[in-house]
Image (tube, coloured by chain):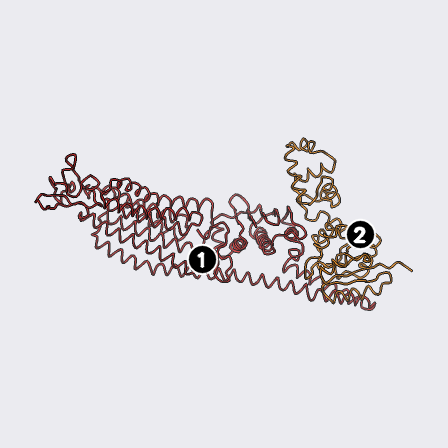
């Protein structure tokens, strides 16, 4: 999950340094998206093919006459008859009617006697699977609803949908159809492989395993190898496991790796949409609610509609991103400009004033003028300090945080700094890190002062040359996670900017406002 | 004839250098014997035996005057820091790194001259207010560390401290070794002296 990789910064686009949404090149993103779409389409095509094959029954078994005129069985390795032990060339004792309500059957003479194979009655299979299919579709609908608000629900919902629609596949007695389950599993497993950085090796291996199993399955079944069934069982486990992995993925993401990005939502929309489409189509086909051609037409229409919908959602998100980016860039520009002004004030007018004051002091009649020049210098100094605390450059982060606490305290609010400063002359963390941490602290304290209605704010920092820990806590109204997310997505409270600054220096950032007061935490390691 | 105090000035702004020199030239018992604009030049000046008081700027093109100050560690000339900014943190850093005084560049000439004389006579030129504010600076101790430092100053052994605080000797040792590292001292005596000198325990809780 790009956006939740703990504060890591990957390659970024252009000047948007550390901007998480645009990580990776546009080309890689397009390739990724195309690959996922292709997998989804392949899964759909296979689903339609396998389903129609199962319904028509020709994938299963048939009766032929051999050269001696005997009736012999012809069996496809994808059919149920094969599973029951019917093999090509076995003499056929009897065959059932294709419209037998109890299911079509075939009886042959095998090496050890009669072999009877009966397809499950399709109608009853459908009846049994109906609740699951409905559940699957409902979950898919829920997924779409939640997709707009809370991504944590998206893939579990899609997973439920997939599982729900898988049940009818397993119940219906068609081995050919399990291949769709297999392919459907490739989508979530592959999706996780692309998105979830942490599990990428694992998920990549799982996806590869699925593909290998698929090939092994085809080979063993077509050659009539007896290992086929073991492979078959394993394949089912992997297929269902792929869906299970979805839950693991989401649970992990939810438990430890909070954070969200709009672009992630776009990706999820695409993947979840594919998963839901596959699951939903399969469920509909097995429900037999509509004739296959109607479903096929519906599917095509659905796919056609999906593109404008995605384009619309994508565009809206894009606008939000641009606004967000502009805000960040503006903040950077302002920051740079303030630093430049502070430097200019320090280097030019303040130095000139001190030089002039020294000379003017030698003129006894100019005592008053000297006094006013000193007052001007004091004011310029105050402006410079306000623009950018000079101790950040001259003395380091510890001094700057101490100063921040001193400056922020007022009669209504106590600001207390506890700083463990292990830095010293010539031993300081990189200046960019000091600045980022200071700005985050500044923002957090400003929030506590302006929004939290706090009475007591603590700044706790432990500063070393290669590690910094910062915690800013207040006793104010706190910050419900939802409010934080909303405020953040609107660029308020500076949460996005704090997070971005943390990401830019590869630091872990956390904000917790659930149990009375807000706590902002930052950990940086060189 | 009064003794002449030999002074050197290091500041990267020519206008400051010349202003200071012009002003100090009017004072009979002060002679500007060297000038520099960089940390490197300041280091060379510090090597000279004839400079008594070095007026040192903080922000220099090739480094930081306060960092340089910490290099002297008692050797070299006495240093009066002349800074563009003056907040508690600056004064604290100057104190900690061994300066003998701290003034704003725009401070009245009389104050500057008085400070130079004070330092040349072997004293320090920190005002009582600066000492009070700057002592300890932002050196901050956790409540536990504060207790331990207090007990160290009163001459307790690690075992006694552990007993007093109802903790293990090991814990006390860990706290102490962490503080040694943080404050760059080698022994408990050094720690106690610094804590005493810089008034760590005088400060209000949390600072």
Residue B51, percent across and down? 81, 58
Q: Taking A415 as reference, is A295 left or right? A: left
A198 or A419: nearer the viewer:
A198
Pointer 1 local density, CA inside 10 Å: few below 14, some 14–19, many at least 20: some
Residue B141, percent across and down? 66, 43
In this orientation, does residue A456 appear?
no
Respond whether the residues carrying marks 1 and 2 are from the same subunit. no
Numbered mark located on residue B125 in the image: none
Q: Tag count in the figure?
A: 2
Residue in the picture at 69% in, 60% down: B60
In this orientation, does residue A465 appear?
yes
Pointer 2 local density, CA inside 10 Å: few below 14, some 14–19, many at least 20: many
Image depth: mark 1 or mark 2 in front: 1
SS at badge 2? loop
Label 1 lies in what chain? A
Label 2 lies in what chain? B
On screen, A115 above or below A19? above
Q: Taking A498 as reference, is B129 left or right? A: right
Q: Taking A378 as reference, is A257 left or right? A: left
Residue underneath mark 2: B124
In this view, the residue farthest toward the front is: A67
Numbered mark located on residue A24 in the image: 1
Marks 1 and 2, how far apart at CA = 59 Å
Q: Taking B175 as reference, is B105 left or right? A: right
SS at badge 1? loop
Residue B140, percent across and down? 67, 45
Residue A84, percent across and down? 20, 39
Chain ID, red in image: A
Q: Colour of chain B?
A: orange
Residue in the picture at 52% in, 46% down: A512
Residue in the picture at 70% in, 39% down: B149
């Amino acid at each position: 999950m790009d956006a939740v990789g703990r504060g890591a910064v990957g390659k970024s686009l252009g000047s948007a340094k550390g901007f998480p949404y645009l990580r990776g090149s546009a080309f890689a993103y397009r390739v990724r998206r195309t690959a996922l779409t292709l997998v989804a389409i392949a899964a759909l095509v296979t689903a339609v093919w396998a389903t129609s094959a199962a319904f028509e029954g020709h994938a299963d078994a048939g009766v032929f006459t051999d050269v001696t005129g005997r009736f012999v069985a012809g069996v496809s390795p994808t059919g149920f008859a094969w599973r029951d032990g019917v093999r090509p060339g076995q003499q056929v004792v009897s065959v059932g009617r294709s419209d037998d309500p109890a299911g079509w059957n075939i009886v042959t003479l095998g090496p050890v006697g009669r072999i009877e194979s009966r397809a499950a009655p399709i109608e009853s299979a459908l009846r049994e699977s109906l609740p699951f299919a409905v559940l699957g579709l409902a979950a898919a609908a829920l997924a779409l609803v939640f997709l707009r608000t809370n991504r944590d629900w998206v893939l579990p919902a899609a997973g439920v949908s997939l599982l729900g629609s898988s049940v009818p596949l397993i119940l219906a007695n068609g081995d050919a159809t399990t291949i769709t389950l297999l392919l459907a599993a490739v989508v979530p497993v592959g999706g996780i492989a692309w998105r979830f950085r942490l599990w990428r090796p694992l998920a990549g291996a799982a996806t590869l395993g699925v593909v290998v199993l698929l090939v092994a399955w085809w080979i063993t079944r077509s050659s009539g190898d007896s290992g086929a069934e073991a492979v078959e069982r394993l394949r089912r486990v992997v297929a269902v496991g792929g869906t299970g992995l979805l839950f693991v993925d989401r649970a992990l993401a939810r438990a430890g790796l909070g954070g969200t990005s709009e672009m992630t939502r776009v990706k999820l929309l695409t993947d979840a949409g594919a998963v839901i489409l596959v699951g939903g189509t399969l469920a509909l086909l097995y429900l037999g609610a509509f004739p296959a051609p109607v479903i096929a037409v519906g599917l095509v229409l659905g796919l056609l509609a999906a593109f404008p919908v995605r384009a619309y959602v994508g565009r809206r998100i894009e606008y939000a991103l641009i606004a967000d980016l502009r805000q960040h860039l503006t903040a950077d520009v302002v920051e740079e400009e303030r630093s430049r002004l502070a430097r200019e004030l320090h280097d030019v007018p303040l130095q000139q004033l001190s030089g002039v004051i020294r000379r003017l002091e030698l003129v006894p009649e100019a005592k008053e003028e000297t006094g006013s020049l000193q007052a001007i210098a004091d004011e310029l100094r105050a402006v410079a300090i306000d623009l950018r605390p000079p101790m950040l450059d001259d003395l380091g982060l510890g001094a700057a945080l101490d100063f921040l606490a001193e400056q922020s305290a007022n009669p209504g609010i106590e600001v207390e700094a506890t700083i463990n400063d292990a830095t010293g002359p010539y031993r300081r963390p990189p200046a960019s890190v000091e600045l980022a941490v200071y700005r985050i602290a500044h923002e957090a304290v400003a929030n506590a002062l302006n929004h939290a209605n706090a009475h007591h704010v603590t700044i706790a920092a432990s500063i070393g040359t290669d590690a910094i820990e910062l915690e800013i806590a207040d006793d104010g109204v706190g910050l419900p996670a939802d409010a934080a997310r909303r405020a953040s997505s609107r660029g308020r409270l500076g949460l996005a900017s704090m997070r971005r600054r943390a990401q830019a220096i590869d630091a872990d950032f956390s904000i917790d406002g659930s149990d009375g007061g807000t706590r902002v935490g930052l950990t940086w390691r060189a | 004839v009064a003794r002449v105090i030999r002074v050197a000035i290091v500041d990267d702004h020519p206008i400051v250098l010349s202003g200071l020199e012009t002003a100090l030239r009017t004072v009979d018992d002060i002679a500007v014997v060297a000038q520099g604009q960089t940390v490197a030049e300041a280091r060379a000046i510090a090597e000279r035996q004839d400079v008594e008081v070095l007026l040192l700027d903080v922000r220099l093109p090739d480094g930081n005057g306060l960092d340089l100050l910490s290099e002297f560690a008692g050797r070299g000339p006495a240093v009066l820091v002349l800074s563009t900014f003056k907040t508690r943190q600056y004064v604290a850093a100057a104190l900690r790194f061994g300066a003998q005084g701290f003034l704003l560049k725009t401070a009245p000439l009389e104050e500057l001259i008085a400070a130079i004389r004070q330092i040349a006579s072997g004293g320090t030129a920190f005002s009582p207010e600066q000492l009070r504010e700057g002592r300890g600076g932002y050196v901050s101790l956790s409540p536990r560390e504060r207790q331990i430092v207090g007990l160290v100053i009163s001459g307790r052994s690690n075992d006694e401290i552990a007993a007093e605080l109802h903790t293990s000797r090991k814990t006390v040792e860990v706290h102490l070794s962490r503080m040694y590292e943080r404050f760059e001292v080698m022994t408990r005596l050094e720690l106690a002296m610094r804590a005493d000198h810089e008034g760590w325990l005088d400060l209000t809780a949390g600072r």
